[in-house]
Image (cartoon, rainbow, N blue to C red):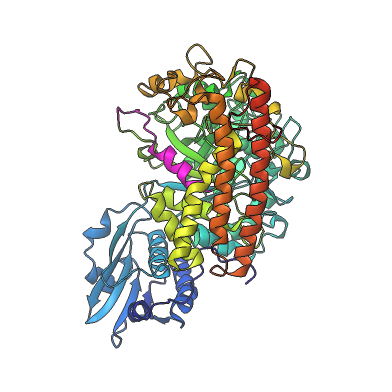
Amino acid sequence: NQYDDCWLRYERVGSDKRLDSYQRRCRHAYVAEKSPECGAVRDELRRALSGLLGEDPHFWQHPPTTVDGFLAIGTPDDMAMIAESVPGDDIADLEDGGYLIRSVTWNDADCLVVTAPTDRGLVYGTFHLLRLLGTGEPIDDLDVREEPAYANRLLNQWDTPFHRSVERGYAGESIFDWERLPDLRSRYEDYARLLASVGINGIVLNNVNTTKPQRASANAAFDAFEGWQLLESRRLEDLTGLVSLFRRYGIRPYLSVNFAAPMLVGDLDTADPLDEDVREWWRKKADEIYDLVPDFGGFLVKADSEGQAGPYDYDRDHVDGANAIAQALEPHGGRVWWRAFVYGSHEDRAVQAYDTFEPLDGEFAENVTVQIKNGPIDFQPREPVSTLFGAMPETDLGLELQITQEYTGQGVHATYHLPMWKEIFEFDTHADGEGTPVRSLFRGDGEGVVGVGNVGEDYNWTGHYLAQANLYAFGRAAWDPDRSAEAITREWVRLTFGADEDVVDTVTEILRDSWAACIDYETGGLGLMHMMHNGEEYLENHYYPSPEEWPGYHGASEDGIGVDRTESGSGYVTQYRDPVAERYGSVETCPEELLLFFHHLPWDHELADGTTVVQRLYDNCFAGVEEVERLRNLWHSLEGRVDERRYRHVAERFDEQVAQAERWQDVLTSTVREYSGMPDERGRARDE
Ligand code: BDP
């Protein structure tokens, strides 16, 4: 293989009993043929079943009558056999993308039916079935009914065109070779398959940073290409083949665009959203795009943030900005995803997003979605949940998560984000009284969950083999946020490493515990954050410890540590609803893991169990390193049970991770020591 198959390995089924039953129902396939999606289904079956069953499936143009069993895939309208086997009412009210898988007897044959109201649903249903076969589940008595929790499950592909770098990507250069478009690489199709197999239904192409930011950038990508050029007519034409390929897998294309595009791409001398020529320019551009790509999803905009242009340049607000672009997409059914990651003049950046957007609730156009990072700062190892969730009932909202590990060890550390995402999903906003968890939001047609991607040109796609789990888990959790982390994780491990139960248990345990370890060694575990180096070299950036660079984020001084975000401090805590605001606002009730995010406390402040803040920071920093050593040992226990290539790769990364965790521990503990003047009571620091 040219590159790794990730979780679509389709290895031969090990158990004879299962193989028997799978062959009976899947060796013969009768699949609808009418659409590009059905073509994708057939291709996938061919690939998968030849691997799983050890022989190519036999495709029929009609339901076979001379065999013991077969697999039928289509909508009831496509196929009478399906309409006869599954009552229409059973699927009629499924959400777009929903499907049904059922074991049925038809004409005395043991059949499996995958059916759905839409062709996209057939793609998802097929991947679901293949997942069952890949994990060795029984299929003789299936009755599966699934539909996605959120209408939009988007991947933000922040690759910088032409230069082929990836914004915060740690897996090599971009898989997209823009200069060669419209030529297509086979890798694109494999990527579409990976995304569709976990239910992702939109891909936003282009870096959100579409022009060089004003600040000195640590990202070399900015020097080469400016992504706004993708809106140029010849570039748009080049994209059409690529988007057709994604369409086969039910994935709609979107583009990140620059707010000042009317000046950059067009020849206007303003991008003022209230200027009639500017609005007209967006309308024409949208018409042009929809001529080429009728199912185009829309635009993503990063405005007034990190040097990107925005409505503030014209003394307009974010409603003016977003609505001007939205009006152009509206006649075509397109949508603007407008990011809430805005920079302003606040001393405490946490306050910014809510301050900017909450007052605008109700004013955004119907086809605008405000896309909000999970936390108020910036993808830190742990943050409290953004105050905006649940605070804008009249506005479509999207939850933005980071799949790529910018602040959690990049391509080197095994840090699994699903436990973090679960914590976010479960957080009770109290928006609609008690019991309004984050996962209950985003249920409108224009809402959803967005992940910033982690894929690149590396053989294994994600830099670290275990980071494939982050992409998998993102899709699965965005499809069904109620599914347990354990279930999603075990499923990924089985599909990726096979059925050996010890391997499944061990890798699941490594993933489960990895995030907590990272928090401990990178932050000390009491809600501190942003203590990393902002280097000039791209790969140094946000990887090495350097607490001195961002003193405002940890608030360490001689008298204590933490940032006062209570009412008497920056006031951030008051943006939450009660009882959340009360809980976080009081030192007594604030959960320990966020304590120093909300409070500046004396070094010798006693925590619930009597340990002082300073001592807890020491303890957590050391515990984090010990934990990574334990996880490395767990991995070592798999030698000989995981193929050599993957075993060695992950083992080497773990060595690097342990070394790096020690480095964090050293720097953090000596910073704590310097400020507090108090040594670790257990005398562990290296300089003691
Ligand atoms: C920050 C990243 C930067 C992104 C920015 C964003 O460091 O590369 O462009 O977020 O979300 O965390 O736009």
Near-viewer residue (562 or 313): 562
Q: Nearer the viewer, residue 445 or 356?
A: 356
Q: Residue furthest bottom?
A: 66
| Snapshot quadrant of residue 270 | top right
In this rendered view, identify the residue nearer to me: 275 or 506: 506
Is residue 432 shown left or right of residue 371? Answer: left
Looking at the image, is 353 positioned above or below residue 116? above
Residue 369 screen position, x and y as percent: 47, 36
Residue 184 in percent (x, y) is at: 64, 64
Q: Nearer the viewer, residue 50 or 122?
A: 50
Give x and y (percent) for residue 286: 56, 43
The residue sitting at 36% across, 41% down in the picture is 443
In the image, taking residue 164 as reference, residue 431 lies left or right, namely left
Q: Is residue 124 visible?
A: yes
Residue at position x 40%, y 47% in the image: 151
251 lies left or right of 550: left
Tally of numbered discs: 0
Whether residue 386 can be seen here: no
Quarter occupied by the C terminus: top right
Image quadrant in which the N terminus is located: bottom right
Q: Which residues are magenta?
A: 416-434
Q: Residue at x 35, y 56 (%)?
A: 98
Indicate whether residue 225 is drawn in magenta: no
Q: Quadrant of residue 434?
A: top left
Whereabouts is ligand 1, in terms of quadrant? top right
Where does residue 333 sit, x and y in percent of width and height? 46, 44
Identify the residue shown where x is 74% and y is 50%.
163
